[in-house]
Amino acid sequence: MPPIVVSTWRFGLAANQPAWKILKQGGSALDAVIQGVEVAERDPAVKSVGYGGYPNAEGEVEVDAAVVDGRSLGYGAVAGLKNIATPTAVARRVMEKTDHVFLVGEGALQFARTQGFQACEMLTEDGRKAWEAWKNGQTDAPADVHDTIGMIALDQRGNLAAACTTSGAAFKLPGRVGDSPLIGSGLYADNDAGAAAATGRGEEIARTCGSYAIVEHMRQGKSPQAACEAVVQHLVARVPKAQPHQMAYIALDKRGNWGAVATRSGFLAAVTSNAENHLCESRYFIDRGGVV
Amino acid sequence: MPPIVVSTWRFGLAANQPAWKILKQGGSALDAVIQGVEVAERDPAVKSVGYGGYPNAEGEVEVDAAVVDGRSLGYGAVAGLKNIATPTAVARRVMEKTDHVFLVGEGALQFARTQGFQACEMLTEDGRKAWEAWKNGQTDAPADVHDTIGMIALDQRGNLAAACTTSGAAFKLPGRVGDSPLIGSGLYADNDAGAAAATGRGEEIARTCGSYAIVEHMRQGKSPQAACEAVVQHLVARVPKAQPHQMAYIALDKRGNWGAVATRSGFLAAVTSNAENHLCESRYFIDRGGVV
């Protein structure tokens, strides 16, 4: 069944293409997810990831990203990073070139520069206009701009990897971090069991370490779909105030079976393998009273 | 059996005292752990937490802290925070006063100031001397300065809470964050199951979301001690390069039973309840070939 790559939202399908090319040629799941999410990071039309993402309350774009390597449980992450368009590639360098796993703020930017990443203005004209309209009270912060790209992949050697990258909640407090760069919350991968990633309201997602929990459910024998459902059901049962928010997970097991669940309709998983290359609306259950 | 408070390392016993006073008077576990860890945060003799902590590679003290409220799965955290001596109290404000859960870097400092926290110089004369000796090549970075204080408590109403606070690895890269402020890694608490906190080499601890995993093991019926052992055994089996490092967990179940496990000898848990008020060497097993 492998290789396969699964990612979040409509923009995931374009991001899957370079990832799939790497997987098909025998490359690693880690290379695939990092190259894949970079498509969304560099696309100014994606208002919730990387370059062109909506800024914080002070008009500055701050991005968060992480990678997990299922071979070694390797982890690298950055948060509150300014002026770098490809934070997932920086997260990989944190994992591979330092004794650390997570760098934030000005220190993350300093590190990126020492690694040769080019600093750039991340705020686009669209982003500036949206921020000004919010600042002037003409619009509310969009509740739906939290569309992190999460991507999980299984390669021909049976290796799993996960990446997650976002510019975070629109007009957030400076320095705000959601679930995306947090291992176990925004993403997890373990070759022995599976991989998972999250998108949606990070403040709620972080409460239940859902990506880790999904992987553990798969380790215990649940399908990726059943594992995602168990985690979302636990979250909304335990934290009722989370229920109105959109929160979604994608999961892959070590054999290449995938699953996707969201609390609300409209969530799309992008799936690319030898058999599939399309967007699938997830089986969601909260807002329709169960799995449909 | 409740109330009870458990924390990490020798300095935990002093930190337990104000926490115990709150618990004994019927106060909340959340108040107890935040007041408790503040003792270590304010103590310049503790080189790994708050004021007087060893600085980063550039000579600046950066602190990380988090709280988890087991009633609601409430979470608040800060990381890469400079110039604030009591980061756990700031983490609580993030949880209670914002729509967010985690603030990093300059944004975390801005927020703390708006909340009335006083900025102060965090580097003591001892810290500056240690940093200069390292900078001048006279000493290596101390491998053992990663003694985060983690504290977990159960109050008279059956509520659990966890707090974790650290100045991080001595002479770390600026912006480095370990497991301490990460929900599920450095700490977790859920009234339905239990609470746990970690100390030791954060880069390794973060790989297996151990605090969350311990709480899940307790939910499934394991004792706090067995839950800690299962998580440490999984970590060193799955990540052999982690094994030489000191990594330790403390755990409490919802009835007030506690456990503590470390990879190496020398780890102390501070336990304070109606029946106990002392330091206990954990049952460690990796460096003696099993539980002793």
Image (cartoon, coloured by chain):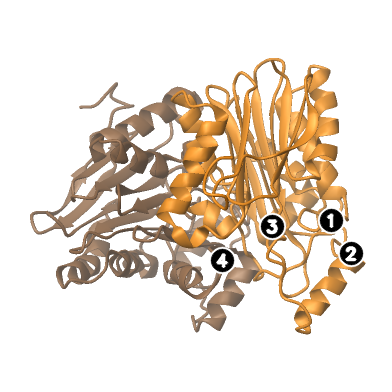
Chain colours: A orange, B brown
Amino acid at circle 4 = His
What residue is shown at x 49% (from left), y 48% (from top)?
B179
- CA distance for labels 4 and 3: 13 Å
Marks 3 and 1 belong to one chain: yes
Q: Which x, y percent locates residue A190?
A: 56, 28
- CA distance for labels 3 and 1: 15 Å
Say whether residue B277 is left or right of residue A78.
Answer: left
Mark 2 or 3: the one toward you: 3
Give the labeled residue for mark 2.
Answer: A124
Marks 2 and 4 belong to one chain: no
Q: Earlier in the sequence, mark 2 or mark 3?
A: 2
- CA distance for labels 2 and 3: 18 Å
- Specify the label residue A51 is tagged with: 1
Identify the subunit bearing mark 3: A
Identify the subunit bearing mark 1: A
Query: Which element is circle 2 on?
Result: loop
Please name whichever residue, B262 or A55, is drawn nearer the observer in this view of the structure.
A55
Give the labeled residue for mark 3.
Answer: A146
- CA distance for labels 2 and 4: 25 Å
Q: Is residue A87 in sight in this rendering?
A: yes
Say whether residue B273 is left or right of residue B214.
Answer: left
Are dots 2 and 1 in contact, CB under 8 Å?
Answer: yes
Give the labeled residue for mark 4.
Answer: B100
Amino acid at circle 2 = Thr
Amino acid at circle 1 = Tyr
